[in-house]
Image (cartoon, rainbow, N blue to C red):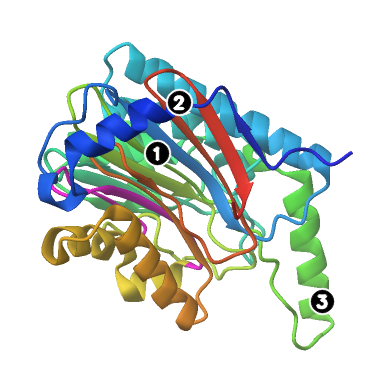
Amino acid sequence: MKHPRSYFFPAISAALVLIAALALGHPAARAGAAPAADEKFILVVHGGAGDWNAPDERLDIARAAISKAAQTGYQTLSRGGSSLDAVEATLRVMEDSGIFDAGRGGYYTREGVPELDAAIMDGRTLNAGAVASVKHIANPISLARLVMEKTPHVLLVSTGAEEFAKSQGIDLVSPFYFYNERFWKMYQERKSKEENKSSNIPAPKVFGTVGAVALDQAGNLAAGTSTGGTTWKMPGRVGDSPIIGAGTYANNDSCGISGTGVGEFFIRNTVASDICARMRYLHVSLEQAANDVVKALTEQKGEAGVIGLDRQGHVATPFNTNEMIRATVRADGQITIKIFHE
């Protein structure tokens, strides 16, 4: 029996939604306003856009993992924690799961070693931190936050980032820590085809980058993204996830965004910041801004998905791939998990 394509426990009262919508009016007109009383805090999470093409049991595992992550972030927000705390806590769970292309689930480079990227951004202050091409960091999202809070910089890479991690008391892990049987098999198959000079080798289209956007009880936004990049990437390749404005962006005056897909398209189009800028300068809703940007990527044949959240509690999750696993949890603790277009 096929599993249902979404979980919703239970539905929010339609009457409350209608009342909130009437009270708020056009979202762009109140971009700097605090959240409505019935939307004290919200968390949106994604586990990657692409073609999951997975058996039901693997989808069940992915649902369980993203549900655990969303619950962790919810608990942080419900206790009055900051949106930054919630984003970091949520993504640490995703990185540790080994289910997604982040942390223990990072894809292998052509050299057979995962290289991980992550970024986090504070929508209240516009402070941000990021790391790229790290090989020995179990939780890159936490190191990205330390870059934001403990250095004058935004982005640290490779051995420089890892030396900084040691200075902050973070233990480096062996590359064997990241061993993932399924992704290792994918790597070996691709390597064999390359060595045999197979032509027109299609890259697997399962991306699995993880991201989170949160609105806390103080009305502040934060966004974060963590990834192992693309399959069979060149060593040293950096995608959009750690690039502020490309795969990650947050600004209380507009929205918070985390992206997933083929990073090169996100970088060329400064996707995350573009969505937020469209809200500020074109005075359009989050949904329209996000949909228009993803549509533009579709026209460029760039596979992509984003999650977005504004200060009024509006959520947008457009994607142009077959699936994107995502979860939303609001102040009442109700978790919605979806994978397919609905």
- Amino acid type of the residue tagged 1 in the rendering: Ile
Badge 1 density bin: few <14, some 14–19, many ≥20, Cα 10 Å: many
Q: Which residues are magenta?
A: 245-262
Looking at the image, the residue that sits furthest to the right is 1
Q: Is residue 81 visible?
A: yes
- Amino acid type of the residue tagged 2 in the rendering: Ile
Q: Nearer the viewer, mark 1 or mark 2?
A: 2
Residue 257 covered by magenta stretch: yes
Gap in angstroms between the C-alphas marked 3 and 1 = 33 Å
Badge 2 density bin: few <14, some 14–19, many ≥20, Cα 10 Å: few
Q: Which mark is residue 141?
A: 1
- Amino acid type of the residue tagged 3 in the rendering: Lys
Rendered position, 104 above or below 107? above
Residue labelled with disc 2: 12
* Viewer-side residue, 90 vs 236: 90
Residue labelled with disc 3: 193
Q: Residue at x 82, y 37 (%)?
A: 57
Circle nearer the N terminus (1, 2): 2
Q: Which mark is residue 264?
A: none
* Viewer-side residue, 109 vs 256: 256
Gap in angstroms between the C-alphas marked 1 and 2 = 31 Å
Q: Is residue 175 visible?
A: no
The image position of residue 142, as x and y in percent, is: 37, 33
- The residue tagged with tag 2: helix, strand or loop? loop
The image position of residue 308, as x and y in percent, is: 35, 49
Circle nearer the N terminus (3, 1): 1
* Viewer-side residue, 136 vs 324: 324
